[in-house]
Amino acid sequence: MVRFDAVFLVDDDPINNLINRRLLGKTGISDRIEEFLGGEDALEKINELKPEDSLIIFLDINMPVLNGWEFLNKYLDTYSHRNDKIIILSSSIDFLDRQKANGYPIVSGFLEKPLTLEKISSQMEQYT
């Protein structure tokens, strides 16, 4: 399985982050898994990464203050030079959300909650 220098979980639900952190830890895709309850904190933390560091972000859409779409827009404004992977991880089953996500070239996947080892494996296969 492909490995990343860091995994960011961006979700305003700390329980989801805890569960997802444990699941991702089992996969071995990274030794560094960080949780963020808001998008602004995650965006700031990206500044601390080296430009060549590989990062995968699991991003919730429905968050207060800065939702997933706003996060994506700010990310593209600031970090379009990076080669990160962003996966939408949402409880939304709305086809329009999937369609909107497909409009962002940086988004490489759209997974419905809850995250499972099978969903992670399937997503990681496209990066090898």
Image (spheres, grey):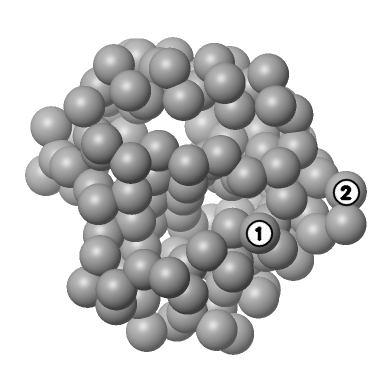
**Label annotation for residue 41:** 1
Q: Is residue 5 left or right of residue 2?
A: right
Q: Position of residue 48 (x, y in %)?
A: 43, 70
Upstream in sequence: badge 2 or badge 1: 1
Q: Quadrant of the N terminus?
A: top left
Residue extending farthest front: 48
Q: Position of residue 108 (x, y in %)?
A: 40, 52
Q: Is residue 121 left or right of residue 14?
A: left
Q: Tag 2: Cα neighbours inside 10 Å, few (<14), some, or many (≥20)? A: few
Q: Amino acid at mark 2?
A: Pro
- The correct choice, above or below, for 30 with respect to 51 in the image is above
Quadrant of the rendered structure where residue 50 is?
Answer: bottom left
Q: Nearer the viewer, residue 90 or 41?
A: 41
Q: Position of residue 14 (x, y in %)?
A: 70, 27
Residue beneath the point at 35% across and 63% down: 84
Q: Amino acid at mark 1?
A: Asp
Residue beneath the point at 52% across and 32% down: 111
Quadrant of the rendered structure where residue 19 is?
Answer: top right
Q: Nearer the viewer, mark 2 or mark 1?
A: 1
Q: Nearer the viewer, residue 23 or 93?
A: 23
Q: Quadrant of the C terminus?
A: top left
Quadrant of the rendered structure where residue 69 is?
Answer: bottom right
Residue beneath the point at 67% across and 38% down: 11
Q: CA distance from mark 2 to mark 1?
A: 13 Å
Q: Is residue 84 visible?
A: yes
- The correct choice, above or below, for 15 with respect to 62 in the image is above
- The correct choice, above or below, for 100 with respect to 27 in the image is below
Residue beneath the point at 46% across and 25% down: 21
Q: Is residue 103 visible?
A: no
Q: Secondary structure at mark 2?
A: loop
Which residue was labeled with disc 2? 64
Q: Secondary structure at mark 1?
A: helix
